[in-house]
Image (tube, grey):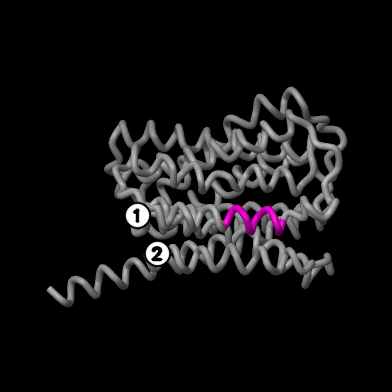
Amino acid sequence: MKTKDRQTQGNDRKSLLMLIISMIVFGTIGIFRKFIPWSSGMIAFSRGLMGALFLCLFVKIRGGKLRHGIGKKALLMLILSGAAMGFNWILLFEAYNYTSVSVATLCYYMQPVIVIALAPVLLKERFSWKKLLCAGIAVLGMVLVSGIFEGAAREESPKGILLGLGAAALYAAVILINKRIGKTDAYEKTVIQLISATAVMIPYLLLTEDFSRISLELRTLLLILVVGIVHTGMAYAVYFGSMDGLRAQTIAIFSYIDPIAALVLSALILHETLTLPGIIGAVLILGAAAVSERI
């Protein structure tokens, strides 16, 4: 009995470590974005396509098979969550066009609060006032990190705010849908989601993209490969693979590591300013994540 408990506890720790690693990787994508002269929509499409192709090849090399033993209901839910992921990318990138990055980011990271609010209803998880308090503290930390009270934001647009909140709702939907799918091969799950995410972007690109202006320089193509394989294929496989061993509320809180990693690494690599309120916000966010995991 004790051995079983230890194994369960070890699996949870492994899932948590996988989640943390994936969040740190996601947090570096902004640095690569700085050096890619493509539109946000084209980068999003490319990362989905490259990630899916890489994972298909990886599964084949490992001797695995796609759609092996997956039910129709699970397949439909994976397609739905993948489509939500694709629209999430589109709405978030569009939010940056209509409002400041800080406000768009703040709106986007309302998604953990949405998950915490809906998990007891949709997933029958036990409601915890302490976790709700931790989510509130994390949101306060994100407000400080965003720099919204330091005059960093330009004139706000209601459309930009709505797009950011829409992206948050869709990302929350991805988390909740994946928790309902249950035990499914992580690589197979991620391939289906990335293909679905890529597919929903095609009409968007056909309507908005000027393909004649796309740069095909070697450095740009190499950076796109890194974004597609490392930041998407590998990172999403690890991210979704961690979900089976974690509660939705834990996933929601630890997702704040993504923007904190982006903030810290941007300061170190791009020499962007890390203000005192930003440091305080980082402490609040990571502190809330640590406390939430223990209660």
CA distance for labels 1 and 2 = 8 Å
Q: Magenta region's main secondary structure?
A: helix
The secondary structure type at the circle numbered 2 is helix
The secondary structure type at the circle numbered 1 is helix
- The answer, for residue 158, to whether it is visible in the render is yes
- Circle 1 packing at 10 Å, graded few (<14), some (14-19), many (20+), is some
In the rendered image, residue 197 lying in the magenta stretch gets the answer no
Picture residue at 41% right of the left edge, 42% below the top? 176
Q: What amino acid type should be assigned to the residue bearing mark 1?
A: Asp
Percent from the top left, x then y, of residue 208?
77, 26
Percent from the top left, x then y, of residue 205?
71, 29
Q: Which residue is mark 1?
A: 244
Residue 270: numbered disc? none
Do tag 1 and tag 2 residues touch (Cβ < 8 Å)?
A: yes
- The answer, for residue 241, to whether it is visible in the render is no
* Image vertical order of residue 14 relative to residue 72, above or below: below
* Image vertical order of residue 182 relative to residue 26, above or below: above
Q: Is residue 61 left or right of residue 203?
A: left
Percent from the top left, x then y, of residue 273?
83, 66
Instruction: Report the front residue among 94 and 71.
Output: 94
Q: What range of the chain is rendered magenta?
A: 138-145
Quadrant of res 89: top right
Q: Which residue is mark 2?
A: 15
Instruction: Report the front residue among 224 and 78.
Output: 78
Q: What amino acid type should be assigned to the residue bearing mark 2?
A: Ser
Picture residue at 60% right of the left edge, 44% below the top? 48
Q: Is residue 123 left or right of residue 203?
A: left
Q: Is residue 60 left or right of residue 159?
A: left
* Image vertical order of residue 248 relative to residue 6, above or below: above
